[in-house]
Image (cartoon, rainbow, N blue to C red):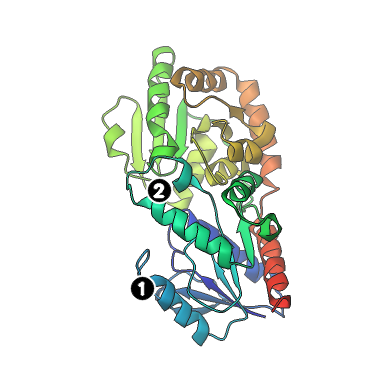
């Protein structure tokens, strides 16, 4: 079976993390009957064992679906896998991964984004033989949106399993990892942090994953920007807690990563975050700064609770592996190929 994956976003955060993890998992499967092609720009970090076909079609353009479709046809594929809802124009059997429906539920800074997303998601679920998604919460959203439940397969994201011991926090630092889009709810987190500082004067809040320039002037806020994998691991291991107050997530990869590193986690009550973290996190009403601040103070003041959550998180994170994700994804490809 020859499968092509649109890996043009392989170097990005978010979907890029998914593509990199999935491709590593496919290599680790060592399936002799499986030949995988990654369509990606020149010098993209395609792992050894995956065929690399150079493709740099412009994202979110009118030409994109046609350019990707033509490249897929030339490659002689049995199945094509689109790792997000923008799918090619092709007669090749299609598998698509839809990570979330946030564009349809949450305010966007670009007013055209919801209309574009709705159109492309509707097209993707109509044309795909199988629709993969990353949590049961998103599965239910897709069904409500009109996707045939028989098409949907839940394949959780993976995280790198950690062997290093957790380090004790060296300061009262809270951590946020992610972008600064409205649904991430960073403004409420910063407001909650201000309440925390009234009772914990030496507390700090590190924001990483975007520039966060609009918060850099606030006392105690460390707008770290983009960080390396090594620095991210150090932040997870030495922070009091990761705080993820998103209004909505498809999976919540920072929460899973934090759990793998033995970092306590606080999240909102968003369905996917509760599903992924279970009893290994505190869940707060993140629409309310006071509720979020209370959870943050509880973590700081109760070392026993903090360590209990960290221990539970390490165990829970073992449920999320890229190898398992690759196995379920390859099973979906097999189902689609057999239906040809």
The structure residue drawn at horizontal position 46% and vertical position 17%, both measured from the top left corner, is: 290
Looking at marks 2 and 1 on the same chain, the residue that comes earlier in the sequence is marked by 1
Is there any visible trace of residue 68 in the rendered image? yes
Judge from the rendering whether residue 16 lies leftward or rightward of residue 49; answer left or right: left
Q: Which residue is mark 2?
A: 227
Q: Nearer the viewer, residue 310 or 190?
A: 190
Mark 1 Cα-neighbour bin, 10 Å: few <14, some 14–19, many ≥20: few
Quarter of the image with the N terminus is bottom right
Residue in view at x 66 percent, y 46 percent: 136
Can you say whether 48 is above or below 161 in the image?
A: below
Which residue is tagged 1?
A: 63
Mark 2 or 1: the one toward you: 1
Residue at 44 percent across and 38 percent down: it is 184
* Quadrant in the rendering for residue 199: top left
Q: Position of residue 61 (x, y in %)?
A: 34, 67
Relative depth, front residue between 269 and 70: 70
Q: Quadrant of residue 132?
A: bottom right
Horizontally, residue 315 falls left or right of residue 272, namely right
Check the image and report above or below for 9 versus 166. below
Residue lying furthest front in this view? 146
Crowding near the residue tagged with mark 2, few <14, some 14–19, many ≥20 C-alpha atoms within 10 Å? some
Seen in the image, is 196 located left or right of residue 318? left
């Amino acid at each position: 079976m020859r499968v092509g994956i649109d890996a043009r976003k392989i170097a990005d955060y978010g979907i890029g993390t998914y593509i990199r993890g999935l491709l590593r998992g496919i290599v680790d499967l060592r399936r002799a009957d499986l030949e995988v092609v990654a369509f990606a720009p020149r010098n993209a970090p395609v792992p050894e064992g995956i065929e690399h076909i150079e493709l740099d079609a412009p994202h979110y353009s009118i030409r994109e679906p046609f350019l990707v479709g033509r490249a897929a046809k030339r490659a002689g594929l049995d199945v094509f896998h689109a790792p997000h809802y923008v799918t090619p124009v092709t007669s090749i059997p299609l598998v698509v991964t839809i990570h979330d429906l946030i564009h349809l539920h949450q305010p966007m800074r670009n007013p055209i984004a919801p209309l574009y997303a709705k159109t492309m998601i509707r097209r993707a679920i109509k044309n795909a033989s199988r629709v993969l998604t990353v949590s049961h919460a998103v599965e239910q959203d897709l069904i409500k949106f009109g996707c045939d439940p028989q098409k949907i397969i839940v394949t959780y994201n993976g995280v790198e399993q950690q062997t290093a011991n957790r380090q004790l926090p060296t300061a009262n630092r809270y951590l946020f990892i992610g972008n600064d889009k409205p649904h991430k709810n960073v403004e409420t987190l910063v407001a909650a942090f201000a309440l925390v500082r009234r009772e914990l004067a030496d507390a700090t809040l590190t924001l990483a994953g975007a520039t966060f320039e609009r918060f850099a002037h606030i006392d105690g806020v460390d707008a770290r920007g983009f960080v390396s994998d090594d620095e991210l691991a150090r932040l997870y291991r030495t922070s009091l807690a990761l705080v993820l107050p998103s209004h909505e997530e498809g999976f919540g990869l920072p929460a899973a990563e934090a759990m793998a590193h033995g970092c306590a986690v606080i999240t909102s009550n968003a369905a996917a975050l509760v599903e992924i973290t279970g009893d290994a996190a505190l869940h707060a009403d993140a629409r309310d700064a006071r509720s979020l601040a209370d959870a943050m103070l509880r973590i700081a003041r109760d070392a026993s609770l903090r360590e209990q959550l960290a221990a539970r998180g390490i165990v829970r994170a073992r449920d999320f592996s890229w190898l398992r994700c690759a196995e379920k994804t390859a099973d979906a490809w097999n189902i689609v190929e057999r239906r040809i």
